[in-house]
Amino acid sequence: MCFSKAISYCTCFIVGGFSPAFSETIDLPDGLLFGARFSEVQVIAQSQGWELVRTTFNSNAWSVDTMGLTLYFCNHKLATVDEYLSGDLKEFIDTVWALTIEYGSPETSVTHIPLLGRAISSDFKTDGSLDITVQIVELESGMKLWTRTTDTSICAAE
């Protein structure tokens, strides 16, 4: 799942002339692995020059603003990765299309988020324990695209 232009979230593949945001395997950036202990993620972050900052909205979430990432932990283990992008509607469609080919039809919804705007969200359930969400939100400043990948097996063990 190679989401952004600047970050190689994984190796993208080319299908039909576009570069979708996902490949056949799910790799996290720079050595991160689902289930990695927080202390292991800290070592990786330090080696990459990332500053992990605890978020104000969730005590189990840490952001890496320079990478456009938010990392969520369950029992001190990496369970969810959000990546925020500067994508547009075309990138959203290409990403959803690539995931549809790989995982089947998503559950898609269109909602209005108070104070933000309208959003389109596509949720994919894989055969394994990964859930993938791709969302585009219409803001006053333009479109905001983000992805969320969760390994549901990590929090299920609680």
Image: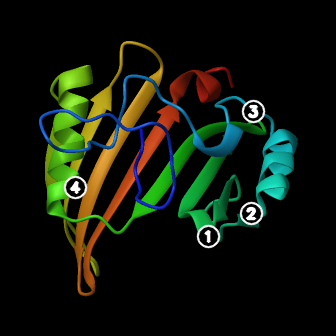
3 vs 4, front mark: 4
Q: CA distance from mark 1 to mark 2?
A: 7 Å
Assess whether mark 2 and mark 1 are in contact (beta carbons under 8 angstroms).
Answer: yes
Please report whichever mark, 3 or 1, sits nearer to the chain's N-terminal start.
3
How crowded is the residue under tag 2: few (<14 C-alpha within 10 Å), some, or many (20+)?
some
Could you tell me which secondary element the residue under label 2 belongs to? loop
Comes first in the chain, label 4 or label 1: 1
**Which disc, if any, is residue 49?**
none
Return the residue found at the far top. 127
- Quarter residue 50 falls in: bottom right
Check residue 36 in the rendering and tell me which mark sits there, or answer none.
3
The alpha-carbon separation of the residues under discs 3 and 1 comes to: 21 Å
Three-letter amino acid code of the residue under disc 4:
Glu
- Label 4 belongs to which residue? 91
Please indicate, yes or no, whether residue 106 appears anywhere in the rendered image.
Answer: no
The answer to whether residue 131 is seen in the rendering is yes
Evaluate if marks 2 and 3 touch, with contact meaning CB atoms under 8 Å apart: no
The residue that label 1 is drawn on is 66
The spot of residue 29 in percent (x, y) is: 60, 44
Instruction: For the N terminus, give its image quadrant.
Output: top left
